[in-house]
Image (cartoon, grey):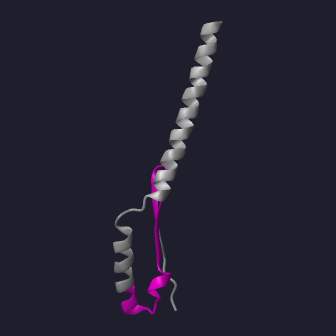
């Protein structure tokens, strides 16, 4: 019976550690920007401004990661 007590605590401890690791990984995914996003934003501004009047300060580029998928979101308001 005493052995069962330690096994239950070990499972709870392992589950808590797993949950903490998942939280840390999710935080790192959100906080780490892809290094190319600033360059991509600048290139998009150069190309699109040749054809359409835009405000470079309003251009937003973001990369969102979800488990097995990455989504590149580009928002360029046109004047």
Comparing 70 with 41, the one in front is 41
Q: Is residue 74 above or below residue 3?
A: below
Task: Where is residue 38? Give x, y as percent.
Answer: 37, 72
Q: Residue at x 43, y 58 (%)?
A: 32
Q: Quadrant of residue 46?
A: bottom left
Count of numbered marks: 0
Residue occupying image coordinates x 49% and y 57%: 30
Q: Quadrant location of residue 39?
A: bottom left
Which quarter of the picture shows residue 20? top right
Q: Camera-side residue: 19 or 45?
A: 19
Instruction: Please state if 71 lies on the left or on the right of 15 as rendered.
Output: left
Residue 58 shown in magenta = yes
Query: Quadrant location of the N terminus?
Result: top right
Q: Residue at x 61, y 26 (%)?
A: 12
For the record, the magenta segment spans 47-72
Residue at the (54%, 45%) spot, across then down? 23
Residue 65 shows up from this direction: no
Residue 64: % across, % down = 48, 60
Instruction: Say if 26 sits above or below 40 in the image.
Output: above
Q: Position of residue 79 (x, y in %)?
A: 52, 92
Query: From where the camera sits, is residue 11 visible?
Result: yes
Magenta segment includes 14: no
Residue 30, above or below 74: above
- Give the answer, above or below, for where 19 lies relative to 2: below
């Amino acid at each position: 019976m005493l052995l069962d007590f330690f096994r239950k605590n070990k499972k709870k401890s392992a589950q808590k550690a797993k949950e903490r690791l998942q939280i840390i990984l999710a935080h790192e995914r959100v906080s780490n920007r892809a290094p190319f996003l600033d360059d991509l934003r600048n290139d998009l501004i150069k190309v699109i401004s040749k054809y359409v009047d835009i405000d470079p300060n309003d251009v937003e580029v973001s990369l969102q990661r979800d488990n097995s998928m990455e989504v590149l979101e580009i928002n360029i308001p046109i004047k």
